[in-house]
Each structure stands twice: as structure tokens, then as C-alpha cells.
Amino acid sequence: QVQLVESGGGLVQPGGSLRLSCAASGFIFRIYDMSWYRQAPGKEREFIAVISSADGSTNYAGSVKGRFTISRDNAKNTVYLQMNSLKPEDTAVYYCNAQYRRLPEANYWGQGTQVTVSS
């Protein structure tokens, strides 16, 4: 069955870094666009970053552009989110998402990993 398993979250001080990983299984990873979203307490889930299956191009939310980097390793069926210069407002549960463009219902979510930025 389809699985997306996030890891790498934790507690970090402001200005610090974390790298999140999302290991995928149960589907053809390389043909899916992969994204990261986050949801802070009391807020809607928001888009963070996406990496294309076609050419590896990326796009970011304005709030993280220049600080976060999304990447993928198709050989390992894994997508990453490198987060630098973390701020308290980055505190949230971070979710991995897989989307196959040609089939809208082929959309999968991981269970999330908590990131807390605090001194």
C-alpha cells in the first residue's frame, strides 16, 4: 500500500537548521510531484515547497524562499526539505505530499513530523 513516512523533525533554536525526509513506497515515486506542507496550531495547512517529477524544478512559498530547499532522490524514493535560518513562526507539523498530475485522485499524504523552533 502507499506510504509516506516523514522523519527529521524536532526541537531547534531560532537560527538553526533541520533536514526533513519523506520516504515513499507503494507507488512509482519518480512520476509524482512531491511537496511539503505545514500546519501550525489553529491555522490552515499551507503549501511550503514542490519539486516537479518532470524536470526537478522547484517552487516555494514566499515565507520560506531563500531559507528552505526541497530536493528528491528518485533512486531512494525520498524527498527532502532542508530548513535553514529557522524562525519561531516555522513551528508546525510538516507533511509530505505526493501528487500524480495526470490523475488528480492519486494524491497521498504522510502522517506529519513536528518541528518546534524555540529557545
Image (cartoon, helix red, strand yellow):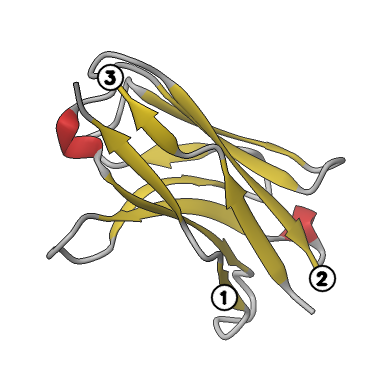
Question: Which quadrant: the N terminus?
Answer: bottom right
Do the CB atoms of the residues marked 1 and 2 lie less than 8 Å apart? no
Taking the view exactly as shown, the residue that stands out farthest to the right is 75
> Crowdedness of circle 1 by 10 Å Cα count: few (<14), some, many (20+)?
some
Vertical relation: 118 (above or below) 90: above
Q: Earlier in the sequence, mark 2 or mark 3?
A: 3
103 to the left or right of 97? right
Mark 1 to mark 3 CA distance (whole Å): 33 Å
Q: Which residue is mark 1?
A: 107
Q: Kindly identify which residue carries mark 3.
A: 13
Residue at left 29%, top 16%?
Answer: 85
Residue beneath label 2, please?
26
Question: Would you say 11 lies left or right of 41 here?
Answer: right
Q: Circle 2 sits in a helix, a strand or a loop, which is it?
A: loop
Front label number (1 vs 3)? 3
Foreground pick, 50 / 114 = 114
Q: Amino acid at mark 2?
A: Gly
Image quadrant where residue 74 sits:
top right
Query: Which mark's residue is nearer the viewer, 1 or 2?
Result: 2
Q: Residues within 10 Å of mark 3 (few under 14, many from 20)?
A: some
